[in-house]
Image (spheres, rainbow, N blue to C red):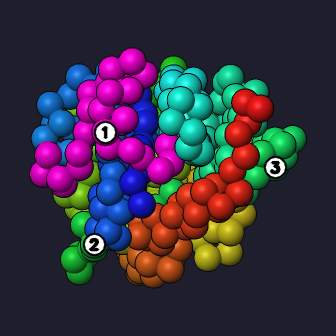
Amino acid sequence: MRILVMTRFYRSGQTTHVLDLCTELLQLGHRVLLAISDLNDVVYLQKMKVEGIPHLLTSNWARLGTRLAKWQPEIIHSHSAHTLPVALELGQRLNIPTVSTVHYLDFAPRELLNKQAAVILISREMQAHFADLTTPSFVVENGVNLGRLKPRTKRWRQLALILAQGTPEKRENFRQISQYLRSWGWEVACAGHWPCPGTKYLGWVHDVTLPLKQANLVVGTGRAIREGMAAGCAAFVLGVHCDGLVTPDNIWALQETNFSGRTYKQTFCPSSAAQTLAQPEPEYFQALGRFGRRYALQHFSSRKMALAVVEVYRFALAHAANPWD
């Protein structure tokens, strides 16, 4: 299958998701061309070259048109609201179906989603949020590279890693938890766009493997939680809202909202967090890390994600009607 994947570059887990998907599709024997606009990070560019991902640094339909006329893609998969209008234009001109993955609840322009053959949603929460779509939708949760994140045997070290984009809405929560963790005896490192005061600031980390393998606790949301669990860390869900420590008892509920903190939508409460974090029991946290790795192996595989996406492509190719008619 020849697949045109389109996205705008974001220094976030969304771009990592797209690159991992492209790599998996190539390894499954498909032909992939990635059209990525606004890429201004040489490390990501080098990663695409190392992974052997054919790419064009544009999402302009006029510039893509000539190349695609020769390459003849069978389907277009867009990952950004910024590339969706172009994807639809190209789909119409080439008479091929388009598919979108929606990565966030406040996706706009929402009405364009109904002009496609299928829509991929990344959580059950998102499926409910977009229940009014008239086009077929499928839940395919985000996957992570389980091989790269395979943990070595972890010695106990009271080290927490805050792995997150420090948006203004989240910063106060991150500031608070870093302050309390340090008062409870934790070493705290912070990886992302924004340094938490008093922590070891790692900056934006292109490959989170090493800091995750060193930590016994990861704090964040979404992909950070999935990667942390895959690396054998206990995981604490904190963003705008707080869902707390991921355990075997609550993981299904927290996964429903993609570990966003929206399951319970609680405000970060230091006294509640202190119940598990103030005097951490090494055996308990190491057991959570082992549980997280086992669960990730069962549910978070990027290969499993890619296979599910391919099935959506097959559906789109088999059932697509021209949405412009």
In the rendered image, the quadrant that contains the N terminus is bottom left
Residue at point 37%, 40% (across, down): 15
Residue at point 35%, 70% (across, down): 28
Q: Is residue 150 magenta?
A: no
Query: Would residue 223 be found to the left or right of residue 196 on screen?
Result: right
Query: Would residue 134 be found to the left or right of residue 92 on screen?
Result: right
Q: Position of residue 8 (x, y in %)?
A: 41, 28
* Mark sitting on residue 298: none
Magenta residues, start to end:
49-76
In the rendered structure, which amino acid carries the disc numbered 3? Ala
Residue 270, located in which quarter of the rendered image?
Answer: top right
Residue position for label 1? 70
Judging depth in this view, the residue of 221 and 302 nearest the camera is: 302
Residue at point 38%, 26% (across, down): 65
In the rendered structure, which amino acid carries the disc numbered 1? Lys
Structural distance between the alpha carbons of marks 2 and 3? 32 Å
Residue 237 shows in this picture: yes
* Mark sitting on residue 147: 2
Q: Are marks 1 and 2 in contact (CB under 8 Å)?
A: no
In the rendered structure, which amino acid carries the disc numbered 2? Gly
Q: Position of residue 23 (x, y in %)?
A: 30, 58
Residue position for label 3? 128
